[in-house]
Amino acid sequence: MSEPTYNSGPSEQYGAPAYTQQPYSSAQQYPSAPQYPAAPAPGQYGGPPPSNAGWAVATIIFFWPLAFSAFNHLHSIFPKWSMGDYQGAQYASERVKSLGKIALGVGVGLIVLSVIMWFIMFAAFAAAVDDASTSTTYPW
């Protein structure tokens, strides 16, 4: 190894201390690169899980309060997949699908309930009209 050389130049003119200059080494030590999860084996996952965007749209149509959660999960599928969180992406995909099915069930249930209530209301109106037409007494 060679001796360290000293910086000789204008700094010595002004009384500044000279700094040692280390010899150049071709094998410099750098910090190690961050370790990321290993990529899946080809065909292990086959690609990102389905987005189930149709089910997210169904949440808007049939029961919109669930749409907030459905779209939140929908928009987290690909970022999780690209970061290597394959199980999280699959969970988000399944969650969108289940929220869509819940919204569909609630929406259909509310539609059926409203149709039943309309039939009850029309039956009550028909009974009231029938009672009023058969009555011969007048309140005045």
Image: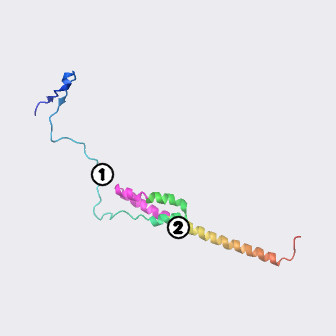
- Which residue is labeled 2 in the image? 104
Which residue is at 56% across, 69% downward? 108
- Ranked by sequence position, the earlier of labels 2 and 1 is 1
Is residue 82 a member of the stretch shown in magenta? yes
What residue appears at the point 67 percent right and 74 percent down from the top-left corner?
119
* Residue 82 rendering spot, x and y as whole percentages: 35, 57
- Which amino acid type is shown beneath numbered disc 1? Tyr
Category of crowding for the residue at label 2, using alpha-carbon neighbours closer than 10 angstroms: few (below 14), some (14–19), many (at least 20): some
Per the rendered image, the range of residues in magenta is 75-99
Q: CA distance from mark 2 to mark 1?
A: 40 Å
Q: Farthest residue to the bottom: give it.
A: 134
Q: Which mark is residue 48?
A: none
- Work out whether residue 48 or residue 12 is closer to the camera in this orientation and state it: 12
Q: Are marks 2 and 1 in contact (CB under 8 Å)?
A: no
Query: Residue 21 vs residue 72: left or right?
Result: left
- Element type where label 2 sits in the image: helix
User: Residue 60 in the image: x percent, y percent?
Assistant: 52, 63
